[in-house]
Image (tube, rainbow, N blue to C red):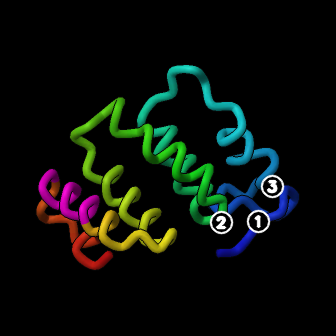
Amino acid sequence: MIKVGVYHPCPCGSGKKYKFCCLQKIETQTSKPDQDALNQSGLIALKTGQLDTAAAMIAKAPQFKPDFADTYSNLGTLLAAQGKHEEAISQYENALRLKPDSAETHFS
């Protein structure tokens, strides 16, 4: 995984420096964050190689919206990156149960 420095361009594509964009989202999670914010922040952490941070965020997301297939797909991607392939497959299956036509999940 590529590590992103705080003054490098943010991997979300906003054009801002990482420090002034998504890093703040990761560091300033509220006590009751919404599912989308957790999921997006978790994906950014995953893309930047912060697997522990990504795991903490993405794993919490289903608590807020358990029927959102993308969360389970993202959790599968995280688990695969951690080498936990059996658990990843289980999460991909959860995602496909909720959204069977997801091409992205089928090819993960």
Q: Residue furthest right?
A: 7
Left or right: where does residue 85 sit relative to residue 12?
left
Write down the quadrant of residue 105 in the picture. Answer: bottom left
Of the numbered discs 1 and 3, the one sitting upstream in the chain is: 1
Q: Secondary structure at mark 3?
A: loop
Residue pictured at 34% horizontal, 39% vertical: 62
Residue pictured at 66% horizontal, 39% vertical: 25
Mark-to-mark CA distance, 3 and 2: 17 Å
- Do residues under tags 2 and 1 come within 8 Å of each other at their CB atoms? yes
Residue pictured at 80% horizontal, 45% vertical: 20
Most foreground residue, 57 or 47: 57
Write down the quadrant of residue 68 in the picture. Answer: top left
Q: Is residue 81 above or below residue 43?
A: below
For disc 3, the marked residue is 17
Q: Residue furthest top?
A: 31
What count of labels does the image hold? 3
Mark-to-mark CA distance, 2 and 1: 8 Å
- Do residues under tags 1 and 3 come within 8 Å of each other at their CB atoms? no
